[in-house]
Image: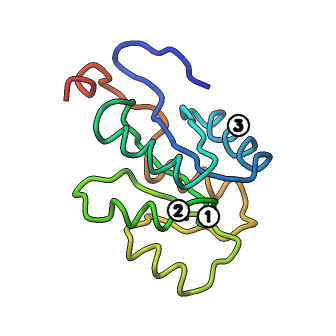
Amino acid sequence: MSVSATNTESRATVILAEDDPEFCTLLAFCLYQAGYRVESCKSGIDLLHRVQAGLDGTEPPIELIVTDIRMPGLTGLEVLEAYCDLPRLPPTICMTAFGDQETHELAHKLRAAAVLDKPFDIETLLKTARRLCPPVIHNQSSRSMS
C-alpha cells in the first residue's frame, strides 16, 4: 500500500503490528486512507526486525509505530523495551484489550506516546497518529540523504 510521490514529499511510514488479521486489515486501510504508507507485522518478532531494519538503514525509516501489546513471540512492550535506551525512536501508539493502570504506566515508562484501550474509536487512533506524525513528509530528498 504505497503511493508514488514527488521528490519533495511522501507518505509517512507507519508500522502496524497486530496479530488479529481482520483487525490489522481494518486499521491498515484506515491509516492508508488517512494518508499514511502502512506496513504490517503479525508478531512482536516481526516488529522487532522491522524496527531494527529501519534503524540500520536496510529498510525505509519508520515515522510511527502502532502496536498491539499482546502478540505472539514478543509483546509490543518487549519490543519497546529493547529500544527504550535509543535517543530517537519513532513515536509509538500501543493498543491493548487488557488496559489496566499498570499496563498503561509501563507503556509510558517505555516511552509509548499513547495507549489505546480496545475497543476504541478508529477516529481516536487517527487523531492520535496525526498528532504524533503528520501523514505527509515534506523535503523527501533532504530526508533520504541523512
Question: How far is disc 3 from disc 1 in space, using C-alphas?
Answer: 17 Å
Residue at 41% across / 40% down in the picture?
Answer: 62
**Picture layout, residue 60 above or below residue 120:** above
Q: Tell which residue pokes out farthest to the front in this image.
A: 73
Residue 87: where, in percent of width, then height?
Answer: 22, 57
Q: Look at label 2 and name its amino acid.
A: Gly
First reached walking from the N terminus: tag 3 or tag 1:
3
Hey, what amino acid is under mark 1? Met
x and y percent of residue 82 in the render? 36, 62
Q: Give the Cα distance between marks 1 and 2.
A: 9 Å
Tell me the distance, in whole angstroms, between the alpha carbons under discs 2 and 3. Answer: 21 Å
Q: Residues within 10 Å of mark 2 (few under 14, many from 20)?
A: many
What is the x, y in percent for residue 35? 57, 33
Disc 3 designates what residue? 29
Quick one: quadrant of the N terminus? top right
Q: Nearer the viewer, mark 2 or mark 3?
A: 2
Q: Residue at x 46, y 15 (%)?
A: 5
- Locate residue 97 relative to residue 44 in the image: left or right: right
Local crowd at mark 1 within 10 Å, few (<14), some, or many (≥20)? Answer: many
The numbered disc on residue 95 is 1
Residue with the mark numbered 2: 76
Question: Callout 3, which amino acid?
Answer: Phe
